[in-house]
Structures are given as C-alpha cells and as structure tokens.
Image (cartoon, rainbow, N blue to C red):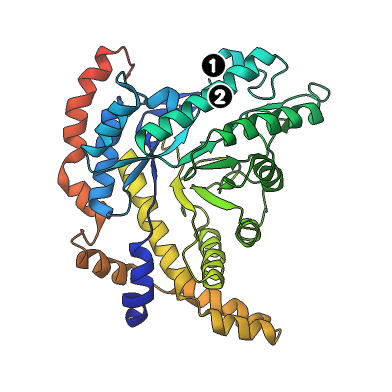
C-alpha cells in the first residue's frame, strides 16, 4: 500500500483542492436560535483569516466560497480579491443570495411577481460581474423557491420562469466560467421545491447551456438515496460540476463530512475514481464544503472535514478497479464487494501523515492547530468586537 500511495495516490491527492465556505466560520444556529462562539468570525477578514489557517495546516484549501450579500466588503469585488490574496488565498465560487430578503418570501425567479423575478435575475447577473472581477470561474446557484401547500403555485409556470432565468444568467457568463445548479428535495418549502432532484437540475442546466452543470450537495437527498449512483450517472453524462460536502442523519443536517456515514462518502469517491479512469484524466469538478458548525469549533470542524475527505479519497484510490471489473464480469458479487470493503478498511492515516510531512505540512493538522494558540488569540481579538456589536453571550 505504501508504495502505491507514494505514487498514484500521492499525485492525485496533491491535485485535490477543497474549497472552504466563508459562512462556515461565522456564528450559526438553527431555527431555534444562534449559538455563539468566542472565536467565531465576525467580519469577512476574520473568515479569511480562519480559512488561511486551515489552508496553512492542510495545504489543500486555496480558495474560499463567498455569499454575495454576506461577504462583499465596502470596497467591492476589488477589495474582496485583495483581502484573499493578502492571506495566500483566492476567491472561489460566488454564491448569489435570492432567499434572504423579504421580497423572496414567495420565491425568487419563480415568484408570481415579475418585479421580484427581475430583481433575482439582476442579482445573479451582478454576481457574475463579481465573479469576473475577483477572477472566479464558478457561479453556484441554490434556490429556496417552492411551495408549502397544494395548489399554491403552478408547477409548469414556475418551471418555465426558472428556465428563462437560468438561460439569461448563462448568457452572461464569460467563456471560461461555469454555472452550477444545486437541487434540494425540501426545506424551506415543504410541499415542493422547484429544483427538487438531480434530474431537474440536469434538465435546467441543459436548457441553460453548455457551461451549466449540476452541483451535488451530499445532504440534499431523501433518506436512502443512492448518491454514488447519481454521481456516476452525472459524470458519465458530462453533467457533474461539483459537490457541497457535508453529512446528515435525518435531513439537511450540514454535519461534518464523514461523521455519520464515511462509507457513503467513500463510495462516492469510488464512483469518481472509476469515472476518472474511464476519462483518462481528473474530472473537472469542484470539491466544496458546505457545513454549519453550531457546536463544534469552526476551524477544528473544517480541518476534520478536509483530512477526512483526503482519507476517504485515498481509500477509494486503493480499490483495485481491474480486479473489481473481473469480479463483475464473473458475476462474483462477494468478490466485488470485498474490493470495496478491503480498501475502506485500510488505515491510511500513517501514509497521509508521511505525505503531509513530505510537503512541509504538519503530520496531524488538527493537533497542530490546537497547539498553535490560534483560537485563544482569535477570541481575544474578536470577543470585544462582538460584545460591542450587541451580541448576547449569556
């Protein structure tokens, strides 16, 4: 294993970049309240500092996803890009926000009010301009549009409004840009959402144009959904654009990747490994994190996610695909399953530690972070600002 790890797996891991979400470093909560942490990020600069700390320790996170309404500083896109560069980072995917403002209560691009639909499309077009200004190639689109009661809206009319809106945004993309269309079966709408599954997302993307692909959020599926099947299908169709990695037990829980079902994440990576072998190259897909750490320390949770993704990707690359195909050809179900189970059972942590050390990184990024004193320094700098802003820490 160690010899193979030092070759194929080492090279592939070196090319694996995992994008961090700016919003994952700020105070977050649930519908029942926000849970505050002394060291959680308060400003864009805080978020970028925290992301830079994760990248410093893992060497795998050079880009940060931003939400336009939450993360655009007073100096605009130019200041945003400069702030990232100053910390050795770049701005990654640009995420429009068409769900927060009160006018979007009954939808954004599927709203019955044409003025609201226009506002949503204009915001997405503004987000394309932000992407252009910061050097990002990715516009990541998630919509809360849907209905909570039968008869509330016309499925077909809403579908047509979505098709028109996405086509207009696609037409504004530069040649090297891409648009990722995310889906979700429910929440915040509970009767239907307008882009409810991967098939709808793929249909909307195809209607929009060739620069549109599907974004798979691993938490956006109904219980029992076979996500690796979806991934393999989309990859073979050339429609797989990226991931939002997290984990879930009940619904869209946004838990740390691999904390609930690491075997499922492993199987997703096996599907990617098979697709890349067939293509003879790395797939052009974005690996992004989308998590909400209400209880865990923000940076520690991000480091856990990054190292877990690396471990599970490495395990997937250990699968002997030739042996797997031979077992399949012989209809040897047990042998085929054992190809996966034996790779998943392999402990790659020692090899990963050596790999990191060879790249000038800490063998154990989480332990290095805990020993660095970063959290105490961040809390000392941020807590007074939080209290001054009126936050409650009772």
**Residue shown at the point (43%, 27%) measured from the top left:** 68
Report the quarter where the C terminus lies: top left
Residue 336: x and y in percent read: 61, 79
Question: Which numbered marker is on residue 345?
Answer: none
Label 2: which residue? 98
Neighbourhood count class around disc 2 (C-alpha, 10 Å): few under 14, some 14–19, many 20 upward: many
Mark 2: secondary structure:
loop
Residue 152: x and y in percent read: 79, 21
Residue 276: x and y in percent read: 52, 68
Question: Which numbered marker is on residue 101?
Answer: 1
User: Viewer-proximal residue, 345 or 166?
Assistant: 166
User: Viewer-proximal residue, 281 or 379?
Assistant: 281
Mark 1: secondary structure:
loop
Residue 301, compared with residue 163, is above or below; it is below
- Specify whether residue 267 is in view: yes
Residue 169, compared with residue 365, is above or below; it is above
Residue 275 left/right relative to 6: right
Q: Are marks 1 and 2 in contact (CB under 8 Å)?
A: yes
Report the quarter where the N terminus lies: bottom left
């Amino acid at each position: 294993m160690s010899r193979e790890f030092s070759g194929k797996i080492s090279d592939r891991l070196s090319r694996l970049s995992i994008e961090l979400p700016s919003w994952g470093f700020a105070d977050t909560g649930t519908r029942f309240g926000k849970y505050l942490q002394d060291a959680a990020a308060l400003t864009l600069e805080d978020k970028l500092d925290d992301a830079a700390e994760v990248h410093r320790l893992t060497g795998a996170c050079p880009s940060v996803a931003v939400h336009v309404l939450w993360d655009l500083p007073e100096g605009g896109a130019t200041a945003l890009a400069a702030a990232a560069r100053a910390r050795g980072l770049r701005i990654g995917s640009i995420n429009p926000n068409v769900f927060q403002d009160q006018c979007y209560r009954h939808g954004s691009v599927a709203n019955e009010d044409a003025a609201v639909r226009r506002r949503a499309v204009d915001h997405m077009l503004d987000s394309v301009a932000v992407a252009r200004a910061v050097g990002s190639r990715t516009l990541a689109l998630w919509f809360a549009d849907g209905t909570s009661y039968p008869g509330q809206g016309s499925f077909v009319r809403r579908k047509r409004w979505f098709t028109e809106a996405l086509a207009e945004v696609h037409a504004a993309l530069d040649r090297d840009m891409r648009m990722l269309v995310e889906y979700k079966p429910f929440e915040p709408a509970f009767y239907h959402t307008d882009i409810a599954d991967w098939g709808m997302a793929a249909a909307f993307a195809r209607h929009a144009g060739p620069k549109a692909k599907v974004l798979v959020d691993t938490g956006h599926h109904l219980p029992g959904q076979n996500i690796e099947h979806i991934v393999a299908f989309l990859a073979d169709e050339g429609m797989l654009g990226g991931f939002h990695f997290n984990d879930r037990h009940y619904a869209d829980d946004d838990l740390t990747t691999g904390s609930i079902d690491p075997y499922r994440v492993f199987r997703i990576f096996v599907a990617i490994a098979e697709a890349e072998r067939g293509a003879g190259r790395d797939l052009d897909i974005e690996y992004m994190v989308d998590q909400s750490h209400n209880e865990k320390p923000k940076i520690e949770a991000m480091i856990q996610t990054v190292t877990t993704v690396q471990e599970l990707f490495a395990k997937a690359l250990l699968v002997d695909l030739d042996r797997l195909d031979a077992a399949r050809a012989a209809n040897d179900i047990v042998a085929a399953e054992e190809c996966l189970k034996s790779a998943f059972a392999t402990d790659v942590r020692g090899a990963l530690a050596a790999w990191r050390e060879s790249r000038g990184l800490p063998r154990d990024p989480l332990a290095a972070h805990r020993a660095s004193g970063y959290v105490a320094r961040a809390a000392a700098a941020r807590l007074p600002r939080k209290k001054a802003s009126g936050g409650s820490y009772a």
